[in-house]
Amino acid sequence: DVKVTQSSRYLVKRTGEKVFLECVQDMDHENMFWYRQDPGLGLRLIYFSYDVKMKEKGDIPEGYSVSREKKERFSLILESASTNQTSMYLCASSRTGLWGYTFGSGTRLTVV
Amino acid sequence: SQELEQSPQSLIVQEGKNLTINCTSSKTLYGLYWYKQKYGEGLIFLMMLQKGGEEKSHEKITAKLDEKKQQSSLHITASQPSHAGIYLCGADTGNQFYFGTGTSLTVIP
């Protein structure tokens, strides 16, 4: 059974902290994505990666960075967390081509 | 810009009623995906449609893609409380993947 695993379901961090969100997939997928989901705004793409050590900015990369040192792992980094980064964060992976995305179960991050 | 228009934004139905959710694009779609999300959780893949006129069913959920491959509908027959959640369409336009804004479905017992 294919799986995308996000390390935390719920996370509470303080303003200014550096935050790491981890995502691991076991399907040998080339592509990995980080989205945030907010009410009324839908899913917004933060960063994505088509290969190891490769990253591309999505629609809202400001305040975030990513790391993909290994094919199965894609990390989202909030350099200095702010309250407007309180959101649901979803990681997804896909094989190149029309295969759709497989999503993790999400991390609900609250920045106080 | 919103590439995928999804409607309605929210839906409240009584258990046992049928309902339809629509997803419309201005571009031809190479693949249309339906996902369901239970509140506070990740997205679960439901169905993928690729060919114009294609229709797929799983239990009481049927999805169709129109002949022009620009509109898809998701139909639930005899809704149950277990159908409640957020339904999202996702589409591959050939060079990018887009998501609709989602439809929140509440089923009242």
Image (spheres, rainbow, N blue to C red):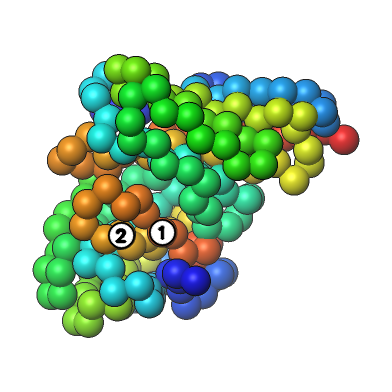
Residue B57 seen by the camera = yes
- Front one among B4 and B20: B20
Residue B3, image x and y in percent?
Answer: 29, 28
Image-quadrant location for residue A76: bottom left
How crowded pointer 2 is (Cα within 10 Å; few <14, some 14-19, many 20+) is rated as many
| Disc 1 + disc 2, Cβ < 8 Å | yes
**Mark identifier at residue B4:** none
Q: Is residue A96 above or below residue A4?
A: above
Disc 2: which residue? A94
Alpha-carbon distance for marks 1 and 2?
6 Å
Left or right placement of residue B37 versus residue A103 in this view = right
Left or right placement of residue B109 versus residue A36 in this view = right
Left or right placement of residue B5 versus residue A13 in this view = left
- Front one among B51 and A90: B51
Residue B5 seen by the camera = no
Identified at 66% across, 23% down, the residue is: B19
The amino acid marked with disc number 2 is Ser
Q: Secondary structure at mark 2?
A: strand
Identified at 52% across, 57% down, the residue is: B42
Disc 1: which residue? A102
Residue positioned most to the left: A54
The amino acid marked with disc number 1 is Thr
Q: Chain of mark 1?
A: A
Q: Earlier in the sequence, mark 1 or mark 2?
A: 2
Left or right placement of residue A19 versus residue B80 in this view = left
